[in-house]
Every structure is written in C-alpha cells, then in structure tokens.
Image (cartoon, rainbow, N blue to C red):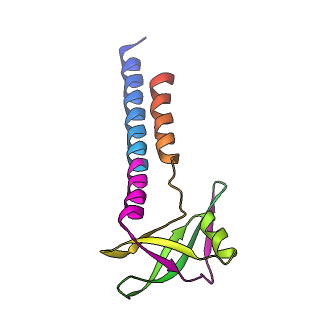
Amino acid sequence: MKPSRQQGKLLFKILGVLAGIVFIAFGMQERSELSRTLKIGKHAVVEPITQYTEFKKSGSSTYTAEFRFKTESGQQMVVKHSFPEEVLAEFKANRPVEIAYLPNDPSSFVFVKQASSWTLVLVGGALALAALLLL
C-alpha cells in the first residue's frame, strides 16, 4: 500500500473518531442539562396550548408552541419552545403538563415527562467505532 493511501486512511480514521467524540460530547451535555434542570429547577404547570406547529423531518416530528406559565415569584412567562411527542399526547388528553424551569432564567425549561435521549451518544459511538474498524 502506498504511503499516501495509508496516510489518507489514517486521516479518515482520526476524523471519524473525532466526529464520534463530538457527537458523544453533545449528547452527554444534552442529557446533563436535562438532568440538572429537573434536579434544581422550580416546577410549574403550563397552560393548555391552543395551537402548535409540527415539523416533519426524516420520519420524526418536532413540535413547537407558545407556552404560558407563572413562576414561583408570580412572574407570567410566555415562551416559544419545542416539545416532544409524549408532551403532545398529554395536551391532547387534557392532562396538566408540568415543567421544570431554571430559577435564574425561567425561559429555560424542560418538560418533567421528557425522556433524555441517548441518540447522539449512540450515533457518536457508532461513528467512532465504524471509523476504527472499517477504514
């Protein structure tokens, strides 16, 4: 095998592993932020939504709506935020939807029933592994 071809393969392996590490890092950060907000956040129940926007991409849907809630200190909040499908099911069933917001930044919140995703971590791991094994 020519040295330039070997260097090219090595470069692709390094880039693949680095890309995998970036995906893993972002996935872990996302999971950590969700956990942290649920742990230290103040809880509130959002008012039922009257309308939402659905974005479909690659077979999955993302929803966005304006959420209204009152903070512990009485501040009325109106925040445009995306939400997962399981939260939409709660709204359609007319059940109260609880959020956890950061006390110092109430516009930053997560849904209590929101499951943290392993997708980015798994994609990153698969990418790094594929780069190491296949190239």
Residue at left offset 39%, top offset 64%: 37
Q: Position of residue 84 (x, y in %)?
A: 58, 64
Vertical side of 115 occupied by 27: above or below: above
* Residue 127 pos. (x, y %): 48, 35
Asked if the magenta segment contains residue 113, the reply would be no
Q: Residue at x 45, y 79 (%)?
A: 79
Residue 47 is inside the magenta segment: yes
Q: Is residue 110 above or below residue 106?
A: above
Give residue 71's quadrant in the image.
bottom left
In the displayed orientation, state which residue is furthest to the top: 1
**Left or right of 126: which side holds 17?**
left
> Camera-side residue: 90 or 134?
90
Residue at x 52%, y 73% (from the top left corner): 98
Highlighted magenta segment, given as a residue range = 28-57
As drawn, is 72 to the left or to the right of 118?
A: left
Question: Where, quadrant-wise, is the N terminus in this rendering?
Answer: top left
Would you place residue 106 above or below residue 30 in this image?
below
Quarter location, residue 20: top left
Q: Residue at x 50, y 40 (%)?
A: 122
Residue 120: x and y, percent? 48, 47
Comparing 92 with 66, the one in front is 92
Instruction: Give the residue at the far left of this rendering.
Output: 104
* Residue at the outermost right position: 93
Above or below: residue 69 compared with residue 29: below
Q: Quadrant of residue 90?
A: bottom right
Measured from the top left, where is residue 17 in percent x and y? 40, 33
In the rendered view, does 111 fall on the left or right side of 18? right
